[in-house]
Image: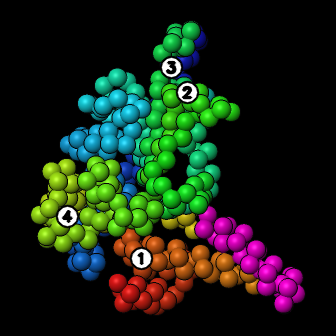
């Protein structure tokens, strides 16, 4: 077999593996239309949550809404990339460099009119090694889009990683700002290269500062829609800017087809990242609990105190996680199964949340 034939066979095999994986995911079971309508009615769903997996992709990863994506990127990163006037969506699944390498899947992957690449991710809960995962994403995007004929590295692609986070990132603990950009810098804090840049928007910090922010700022206007579109009252809707209105109208469930409604409800019921979130929260709680336990150990004996601290830390983390999932509209039965709680306990927390609003 010739080398060329061998390369073609390898490429075909890798593509076949990718296709099979995609087909398997597409065969997911959707709730019936009757179940979907019942779920929408039970949870009084009128406006799509843009932070859900389906909501994020509908808003930013569809051809008809690329004006919303371009607006979002332009108001945050155009000083690095130049004004984006057009976007082309790219496949979100990327094969590894070698035959048996694991492939990665981006939430959204696209390029602009100049060929600059953008990886856009929505992260709804803490995951271990998230920043390292982004390093893999940007490195793979660089290698896969570099032409090996470019012997002098004159045309290495520029990669921009834009991340919308629903929580406070541990890496930015103690910092008030809700938008951060990360360049490669030298010891004098001078920028070494802008060809790979990471951007992070922490929506939790944005929401906490909302009342003190300048709401004529385009950045604040678009983030306001991500965090508040579900709760808008009629007078607020009437005051929306044209771009905010585009955003709002795209979130109206009454405009969905039956299949779109089913996809959205399936997304809410599945909540894909929940299991990873639970494990990450539990590990952090255990570490926090050990510190609490050391203090308790002064009075109750070191070993006993540490154990009690671990248990208390895990309990606090589980409580917070359940509250976060309830706020996202996830079915209490699903939450109970994931958190290893009785459904009655989850419903009690839901009632407490409702009474506190």
| Quarter assignment of residue 85 | top left
Figure coloring: rainbow
The residue that mark 3 highlights is 156
The range drawn in magenta is: 280-307
Instruction: Determine whether the residue tagged by mark 1 lies in a helix, strand or loop.
Output: helix
In front: mark 3 or mark 2? Answer: 2
Distance of label 1 from label 3 (alpha carbons) = 45 Å
> Is residue 149 placed above or below 7 in the rendered structure?
above
In this view, the residue in front, 279 or 2, is 279
Tell me the CA gap for discs 2 and 4.
44 Å
Labelled pair 1, 4 in contact (Cβ < 8 Å): no
Q: Does any portion of residue 68 appear in the rendered image?
A: yes
Disc 2 residue crowd, few under 14, some 14–19, many 20+, Cα 10 Å: few
Residue 2 disc label: none
Q: Dot 2 lies on which element?
A: strand
- Gap in Å between the C-alphas at discs 3 and 2? 12 Å
> Residue 38's x, y, as percent?
24, 77
Q: Residue furthest left?
A: 238
Name which residue lies at 46% across and 73% down. 324
Q: Which residue is mark 4?
A: 253
CA gap, disc 2 and disc 1? 42 Å
C-alpha span from label 3 to label 4 = 42 Å
Q: Nearer the viewer, mark 2 or mark 4?
A: 2
Residue where numbered disc 1 is placed: 326
Q: Are marks 3 and 4 in contact (CB under 8 Å)?
A: no
Residue 193: assigned label: 2
Q: Is residue 285 above or below residue 182?
A: below
Q: CA distance from mark 1 to mark 4?
A: 20 Å
Q: Is residue 329 left or right of residue 291?
A: left
């Amino acid at each position: 077999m010739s080398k060329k034939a061998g390369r073609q066979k390898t490429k075909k095999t890798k593509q076949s593996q990718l296709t099979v994986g995609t087909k398997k995911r597409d065969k997911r079971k959707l709730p019936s239309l009757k179940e979907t309508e019942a779920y929408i009615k039970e949870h009084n769903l009128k406006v799509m949550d843009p932070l859900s997996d389906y909501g994020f992709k509908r808003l930013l990863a569809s051809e008809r809404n690329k004006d919303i994506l371009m607006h979002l990127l332009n108001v945050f990163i155009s000083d690095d990339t130049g004004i984006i006037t057009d976007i082309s969506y790219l496949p979100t699944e990327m094969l590894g460099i070698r035959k048996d390498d694991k492939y990665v899947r981006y939430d959204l992957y696209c390029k602009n009119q100049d060929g600059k690449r953008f990886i856009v991710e929505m992260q709804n809960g803490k995951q271990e090694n998230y920043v390292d995962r982004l390093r893999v994403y940007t490195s793979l995007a660089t290698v896969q889009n570099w032409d090996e004929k470019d012997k002098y590295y004159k045309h290495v692609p520029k990669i921009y990683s834009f991340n919308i986070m629903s929580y406070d990132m541990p890496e930015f603990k103690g910092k008030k700002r809700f938008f951060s950009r990360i360049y490669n810098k030298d010891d004098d804090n001078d920028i070494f290269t802008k060809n790979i840049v990471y951007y992070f928007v922490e929506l939790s910090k944005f929401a906490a500062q909302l009342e003190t922010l300048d709401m004529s700022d385009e950045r604040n206007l678009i983030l306001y829609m991500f965090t508040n579109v579900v709760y808008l009252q009629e007078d607020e809707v009437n005051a929306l800017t044209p771009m905010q209105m585009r955003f709002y109208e795209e979130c109206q469930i009454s405009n969905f087809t039956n299949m779109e409604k089913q996809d959205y409800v399936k997304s809410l019921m599945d909540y894909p990242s929940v299991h990873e979130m639970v494990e990450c929260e539990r590990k952090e709680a255990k570490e926090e609990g050990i510190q609490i336990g050391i203090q308790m150990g002064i009075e109750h004996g070191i070993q006993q105190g540490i154990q009690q601290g671990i248990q208390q830390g895990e309990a606090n983390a589980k409580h917070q996680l359940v509250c976060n999932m309830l706020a996202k509209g996830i079915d209490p039965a699903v939450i109970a199964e994931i958190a290893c709680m009785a459904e009655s306990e989850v419903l009690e927390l839901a009632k407490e949340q409702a009474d506190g609003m």
